[in-house]
Amino acid sequence: MTGPVRRVRLAALAAMLSLTATACGGTLASSSSDASTPREGGTLRLVGSGDIDHLDPASSYYVPTWRLLRTMVRQLVTYPYSADQDESTTPVADLAVSVPEPTNEGRTYTFRIREGAVWDAPDGPRQVTADDVVRGFERLCNPVWPNPAPGYFNATIEGFAEYCTSMSQIEATTTAIRDFIDSNEIPGVRAVDELTVEFNLHRPAGDFVNILALSFATPMPEESLKYKPDSPEFRRNFISNGPYKIERYLANQSITLIRNENWDPQTDPVRKAWVDQIEVVIGSDEGPVQKQMEAGTADLAWDTLVPVSDLHRLRSVGDPGLTVEPDGSINYLVMNLRDDQLDNSEVRRAINTAIDKTAIVKIMGGPSIAEPINRILPPQIAGGELTVESPFLTEGDKGDPDAAKQILSDAGISGVSLKMPYRNSGKAPSIAQAIQQDLGQAGIDVELIPTLPNLFYTNYLFQPEADWDIAVPGWLPDWYGNAGRSFFVPLLDGRTCGPNSSNFGCYNSRTTNDLIDQALEAATPEEAAALWAQADQQATEDAAWVPLITFATPHFHSDRVGNYLISLGTNGPDLTNVWIVED
């Protein structure tokens, strides 16, 4: 997934408690203002800039929306709220009774749904069933707002791609969608009985449970077929099976959630639902949002980050509300290997050697925000914690243009001239100029091409025939832990090369592709991690592209918020597991 969506890893301010009481019943309500003491009640207030992207789980691809959906809908499996990276990135049972071991040589997963997990349906609470799970997958292919990441399901579930191809050809009407779903099936998703659902895969996939933890894999009630996907009618009639439900939604203004009285905490092992109400107020940029949180009139930012101008001040006073932690995102220099110049590995080696990564760190705000990276996988992805040796290390990551120039000279290469499109906003122009200078000192001429941010990908990187040679995109995985499929595959699997592919430079190595296949079918996360590290080593040595920097993201919360901690799997604070400290 490319740059528009930022996932965040947040720092712990207090140790995670072992919480055994339920959210309903008030047994842990406290008069204490101690932030470490669980407290039921109150309103959690979020403020921010923009609206949700889609309320429909089938099409939502925006982290703030995913956090909100976690309060209202559940999947068969999900991620726990934990400060431990390994724990927080390992899926646990949610709607399912347990996480099953695959059968049929790793190709079949059978889940049993918890009794008592219900929809807050208009005609009264109704059990979530296997048919609801199947319906959720069938709606992913709707022609109105189709799922934005179908590759995860096409590559794993039997018959999913064919089902989607057929559904994409129907009219984008409520009737056509309902009729298609009623008369067609996905072979690999089957309701065995009322509470048992079975998934059959093309081949073993060690990360399939991670895929099922995505918000996309949400069961949907039968009422969802009454409305166009994510239409105003769909949003007004949204049905919850989580601890909260929508009381009021005003587009581009506010969202108010209240308790879902039909949610049974005994059926939900991951959501405590401490607060009574969650309010999101939209329309403020990062400056006013920061001021409100520091004043205590807002608790969390909805979709903004801490302004860079405030970071030094907050750090200098040691404000406990500030957290800055790595989020697994990277910026890198991609090279278009369709160009004969860059198809030459010696040119790519020279480019890898020349660039001063510390200069880019400074541009981005310094070492508290970014740090150089000399490999492909960040440590938040399985395999990224294992050692990979880059042959292009330079002293202090400052680059060595003279050594790069010598690489070209030894290979008898001269006159390299490259075109570099860059986004004409933010830090991108300064980064482009720094790279132009470094490569220029190595004897490589770089022509800079400014472009509007919204055209950077669509007019250049996603177009195989576009006239560009190098560029600096960003990347962020859709999940963490056993997540090579959402990181390494889109960026470096040569079989994905083509229009709209995220393998922008069309890198294609049979060795790398084989290692990818082995990692995807690995029986254990540990085996997968070792294979992803091998693929990382191979592509790094091959100078597939230049890893530049990895990020840490600054966030802030008011002193009213308790149990605010790092949880990489839930992409930050879990709105169902924080509480409000008594004023």
Image (cartoon, rainbow, N blue to C red):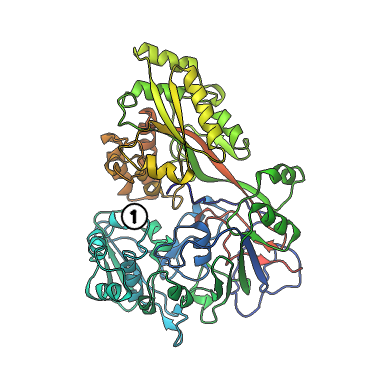
| The C terminus lies in quadrant | bottom right
Residue in front for this viewpoint, 514 or 545: 545
Seen at 58% across and 43% down, the residue is 552
288 vs 552: above or below: below
Residue 465, visible in the rendered structure: yes
Residue position marked by numbered label 1 in the rendering: 152
Q: How many marks?
A: 1
Residue 31, image x, y percentages = 76, 72
Q: Quadrant of residue 204?
A: bottom left
Q: Secondary structure at mark 1?
A: helix
Seen at 55% across and 51% down, the residue is 8
Seen at 44% across and 28% down, the residue is 390
Local packing at callout 1 (Cα closer than 10 Å; few below 14, some 14-19, many 20+) is some
Residue 252, image x, y percentages = 56, 65
Residue 488, visible in the rendered structure: no
Could you tell whether 194 is left or right of 202 in the image?
Answer: right
Residue 540, image x, y percentages = 39, 31
Residue 62, image x, y percentages = 48, 57
Q: Quadrant of residue 563?
A: bottom right
115 vs 356: above or below: below
Query: Which three-letter amino acid code belongs to the residue tagged 1?
Result: Tyr
205 vs 546: above or below: below
218 vs 339: above or below: below
Residue in front for this viewpoint, 119 or 308: 308
Could you tell whether 481 is left or right of 277 in the image?
Answer: left
